[in-house]
Image (cartoon, rainbow, N blue to C red):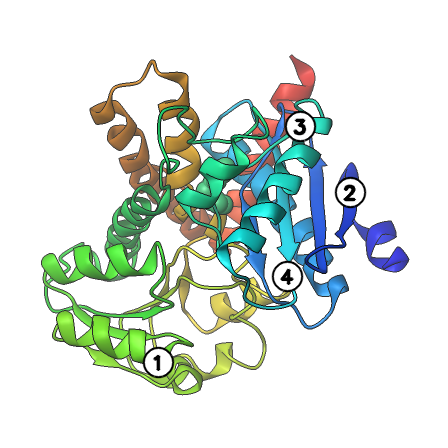
């Protein structure tokens, strides 16, 4: 653990062990340079607490990049509830309340929201204990779900990537393989199908994959065989690190564009994709829809139409990143990184 923390570029890490449930709680505060460290709360089982901690730290860093890329004055943070296994609702509620009180004790250094493994209902419970929850409304039993906004951002991002690769953003007839049909993957699959795409789906929950696939006249694919399937777009919409030196050589697609955070396991994986001629949409840009929408909705000052407009602008941002990457003959990851570094440097100046 010490080694991981010493190597991390973030500001601070809050660790708490929740005795009643045996859950490790990690709140990673990566950067407050642009503002309050903000990012969702992930709840899942990890092999070891260290893995949960590392996930929190890496995801928090991703949030720093995401906020900078969309030009919000918000910093990067993330929390992980590393649970030992599934929990009954009252037990889960107790954990969420203690987590909420822990956030409240940080006095506004960190704000949370929904992420993989948590629901809008969970966030409404957390919001009863702390002010610092995005998307919560005091009158509602569920918080605003960022999923559909994130899905829209990925949809327009896929159009941008199709234009960059094929010169046309026509979706009809394109094949998209969606890895993970959760809160984002499912609405994404539906909107792509409506636009005429052929859909393939994989999910660790294979019954779910089969159900969604049959609803969309698509095909369910066994998870470990998904990488090698021929498709136009491979869309990782589940956990991170699914693109790595073992899986990238298997890919049979021209584009990787999905909603998962931290899709690449190692920084070198961007180069591996680039060398294989696969266009990769940087995760924190294409998946920023939820992050764009939640603070805008919370402000109470932005109309619904304007929120969707802002999310749609992900398309133009990716156009710019793909253009710069092509002009310099480099991976879009590098072009996106330069964009973020410009934003952070400008902020430091002024
Ligand atoms: N968890 C989502 C993300 O990583 C949405 C979210 C953004 C939730 C910001 C809370 C705060 O983008």
Badge 2 marks a residue whose secondary structure is: strand
- In this figure, which residue is indicated by the disc labeled 3? 104
- In this figure, which residue is indicated by the disc labeled 1? 206
Residue 202 in sight in this render: yes
65 relative to 196 in the view: left or right: right
Q: Are marks 3 and 2 in contact (CB under 8 Å)?
A: no
Name the residue: 37% across, 40% down: 289
- In this figure, which residue is indicated by the disc labeled 2? 13
Vertical order, 190 against 315 (above or below): below
If you read the primary sequence from the N terminus, does the residue marked by circle 1 or circle 2 appear first? 2
Q: Are marks 1 and 2 in contact (CB under 8 Å)?
A: no
Badge 4 marks a residue whose secondary structure is: loop
Instruction: Give the Cα separation between the discs numbered 3 and 1.
Output: 39 Å
Name the residue: 54% across, 71% down: 272
Instruction: Give the Cα separation between the discs numbered 4 and 1.
Output: 23 Å
Instruction: Give the Cα separation between the discs numbered 3 and 2.
Output: 15 Å
If you read the primary sequence from the N terminus, does the residue marked by circle 4 or circle 2 appear first? 2
């Amino acid at each position: 653990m010490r080694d991981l923390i010493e190597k991390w570029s973030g500001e601070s890490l809050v660790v708490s062990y929740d005795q009643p449930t045996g859950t490790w709680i990690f709140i990673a505060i990566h950067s407050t340079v642009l503002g309050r460290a903000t990012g969702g709360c992930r709840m899942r089982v990890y092999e070891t607490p260290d893995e949960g901690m590392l996930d929190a730290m890496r995801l928090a860093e991703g949030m720093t990049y995401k906020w900078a890329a969309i030009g919000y004055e918000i910093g990067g943070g993330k929390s992980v509830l590393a649970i030992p296994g599934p929990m009954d609702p009252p037990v889960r509620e107790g954990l969420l309340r203690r987590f909420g009180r822990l956030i409240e004790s940080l006095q506004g250094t960190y704000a949370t929201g929904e992420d993989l493994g948590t629901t809008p209902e969970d966030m409404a419970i957390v919001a009863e204990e702390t002010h610092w929850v995005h998307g919560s409304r005091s009158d509602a039993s569920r918080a605003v779900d960022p999923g559909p906004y994130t899905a829209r951002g990925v949809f327009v991002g896929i159009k941008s990537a199709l234009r960059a690769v094929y010169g046309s953003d026509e979706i009809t007839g394109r094949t998209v393989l969606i890895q993970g049909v959760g809160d984002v993957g499912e609405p994404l699959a539906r909107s792509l199908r409506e636009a005429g795409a052929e859909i393939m789906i994989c999910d660790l929950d294979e019954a779910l994959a089969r159900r969604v696939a049959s609803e969309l006249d698509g095909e369910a694919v066994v998870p470990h065989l998904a990488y090698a399937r021929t498709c136009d777009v491979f869309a990782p919409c589940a956990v991170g690190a699914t693109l790595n030196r073992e899986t990238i050589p298997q890919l049979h697609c021209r584009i990787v564009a999905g909603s998962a955070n931290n899709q690449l396991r190692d920084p070198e994986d961007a180069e591996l994709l680039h060398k294989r001629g696969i266009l990769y949409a940087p995760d924190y840009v294409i998946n920023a829809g939820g992050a764009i929408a939640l603070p805008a909705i919370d402000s109470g000052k932005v109309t619904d139409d304007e929120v969707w407009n802002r999310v749609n602008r992900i398309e133009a941002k990716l156009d710019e990143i793909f253009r710069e990457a092509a002009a310099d003959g480099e991976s879009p990851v590098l072009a996106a990184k330069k964009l973020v570094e410009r934003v952070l440097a400008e902020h430091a100046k002024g």
